[in-house]
Amino acid sequence: MALFVLTAPHKVYDNLLLIYFIPLVLSGIYVYCCIVKAALLKIQGAFPLSITGLIFLVSGINDILLNYGVVKTYNFFTYGLVLLIISKGYILLRGYVQAFAR
């Protein structure tokens, strides 16, 4: 695949990216459904992760659609990623605080 990317014209490679975006989005939706299921089972940290995971998933889909010219918005993927990392840090912090409180 790397040889193909290096030798193929840019337009051909751009069209092939759609083949990779579709499974990526589908697996993201599946992971999000698993996180929502964990939140419904009241697993610790799953609720904030489900909210920020949805924001991250929507920002990723937005950027894919922006790449293909379907929507005219801004790039939000980096903001969604930063929000997800902050959320994961908060979840880890809560876990450490609860562990040392016992």
Image: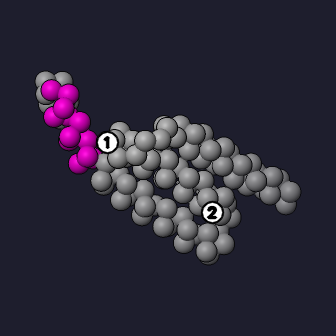
Q: Position of residue 71 (x, y in %)?
A: 40, 46
Q: Earlier in the sequence, mark 1 or mark 2?
A: 2
Pick whichever, 30 or 63, lies toward us: 63
Q: How is the image coloured?
A: one colour
Q: Position of residue 28 (x, y in %)?
A: 42, 56
Q: Secondary structure at mark 1?
A: loop
Q: Is residue 33 above or below residue 19?
A: below
- Taking the spot 61% from the left edge, 69% from the top edge, the residue there is 39
- Taking the spot 66% from the left edge, 58% from the top edge, the residue there is 48
Looking at the rendered image, the disc whose residue lies closer to the viewer, 1 or 2, is 1
The amino acid sitting under disc 2 is: Ala
Q: Residues within 10 Å of mark 2 (few under 14, many from 20)?
A: many
Mark sitting on residue 46: 2
- Taking the spot 42% from the left edge, 50% from the top edge, the residue there is 61
- Taking the spot 62% from the left edge, 75% from the top edge, the residue there is 41
Q: Which residue is mark 1?
A: 68
In reply to whether residue 94 is colored magenta, the answer given is no
State the residue lying farthest toward the top.
7
In this image, 83 relative to 70: left or right? Answer: right
Pick whichever, 34 or 62, lies toward us: 62
In this image, 39 relative to 19: left or right? Answer: right
Q: Is residue 8 visible?
A: yes
Q: Is residue 92 visible?
A: no
Q: Position of residue 79 (x, y in %)?
A: 57, 39
Q: CA distance from mark 1 to mark 2?
A: 32 Å
The amino acid sitting under disc 1 is: Tyr
- Which segment did they paint magenta? 9-20
Q: Secondary structure at mark 2?
A: helix
Q: Is residue 40 above or below residue 31?
A: below
In reply to whether residue 19 is colored magenta, the answer given is yes
Main secondary structure of the magenta stretch: helix
Q: Position of residue 54 (x, y in %)?
A: 54, 57
